[in-house]
Each structure stands twice: as C-alpha cells, then as structure tokens.
Amino acid sequence: MLVSAIPAAFFGRNIFDVFSIYFEQVGQYKLMSLNYPNIWYILDPSGTNSYESLKSASIYLAIAIILVIFIYLIKNKINLTLDKIVYILFISSYTCVLFLPEMHERYGYLPEVFSILSAVLNKKMILLAILINSVGFAAYGKYLYESDIDITILSFLNVFAYIYSLKILIPKIIL
C-alpha cells in the first residue's frame, strides 16, 4: 500500500489523505452486504435487521476461517508452490467477500480473477470459475443497470460455488 501511494505523494497529495479515505469508508453503510451476493443475503435479504448483531461476528468468522487455513499450512509445513499460492489467494479473497460485512459487488473482482487463474491450473475449477464470474456479472448488472435479478438466488449460487471450491482446492493445497 505504501508503494501505491508514492505516485500520489510525488504529485503533491498529502500522504495522510491517500490512506485516510479507507478509514473514512469503514462503517459508512450499516448493511451486511451492499449488492455482493454473499451469505448475509441468505440470512437477512434486506441486510438491515442483522447489521448491529452480526457485524462483529461476521468479521471474527472470516478471520477464523482464514486463520484455520494458515495455521494448518504453517503447522504442517506445506510446501507452497505457485499453484497452491493461487488457490490460497482465491480461497482467502472469496472467504472475505462471502463473510465480511459491507461488501460491495466490486470487491468480488479479486476472487473472480483468482477463480480464473485457479481454473487455468486445475480443470475441475473451470465450471466453478464460470459460475463465480457469472454471479459477479449479474451482481454488477443489478447495480449498474438496475436489472431485476434476485440477489438471494445469486447468494445461494455463490455459497454453493464457495463450498464446492473448497472441496476441490483444499486437497490440492494440503497434499
């Protein structure tokens, strides 16, 4: 992040301003999800009823899932090859958008890109990458073009894709 701030600072932007934008956005919206089809649309489609009660728990859940993966990798001294790193990046980024609160549809870019890279490395991921990117495109369409797509259905598809991705990739990572 520091390296990405260098051009802005070079052209006269205050270095504090470059990073303060992120802190200003935290907590701006009081919804569990903001057009990203994640687990929270399944549990509370309006996103308003559960924000205060689930916000902290959702953050802890996402952290716990990622920590379990990383602790297992470290404890078992898993040899990190390029394909394993891509799979871990995919699962980690997908975990974040599916479980963290206040996720916009644009945050799905990273797991969508890593799903494609995972599909290049593992042909079992091809259909899932198509599904994940289709769900993402549908979510963008809902936001950009106000299309009449049910985010809850997209959320079920996304959660299914996440679970099935874990089924395919976890054995590839730990073996």
Image (cartoon, rainbow, N blue to C red):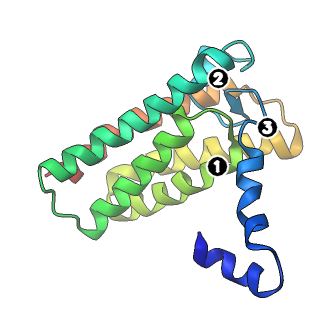
Residue at disc 1, secondary structure: helix
**Residue 28 image label:** 3
Q: Amino acid at mark 2?
A: Tyr
Q: Identify the image quadrant of residue 165.
A: top left
- Left or right: 108, with 172 as reference point: right
- Left or right: 106, with 142 as reference point: left
Q: Identify the image quadrant of residue 82.
A: bottom left
Q: Is residue 144 above or below residue 86?
A: above
Residue placed most toward the observer, 20 or 135: 20
Residue at disc 3, secondary structure: loop
State how far apart marks 3 and 2 are (Cα): 19 Å
Label 3 with label 2: CB-CB less than 8 Å: no
Q: Is residue 62 above or below residue 41?
A: below
Q: Amino acid at mark 3?
A: Gln
- Mark 1 sits on what residue? 107
- Mark 2 sits on what residue? 41
Q: Identify the image quadrant of residue 138.
A: top right
Q: Nearer the viewer, mark 3 or mark 2?
A: 3
What residue appears at the point 63 percent right and 31 percent down from the top-left corner? Answer: 154
- Left or right: 67, with 90 as reference point: left
State how far apart marks 2 and 1 are (Cα): 16 Å
Q: Is residue 78 above or below residue 105?
A: below
Label 2 with label 1: CB-CB less than 8 Å: no
What residue appears at the point 79 percent right and 44 percent down from the top-left corner? Answer: 141
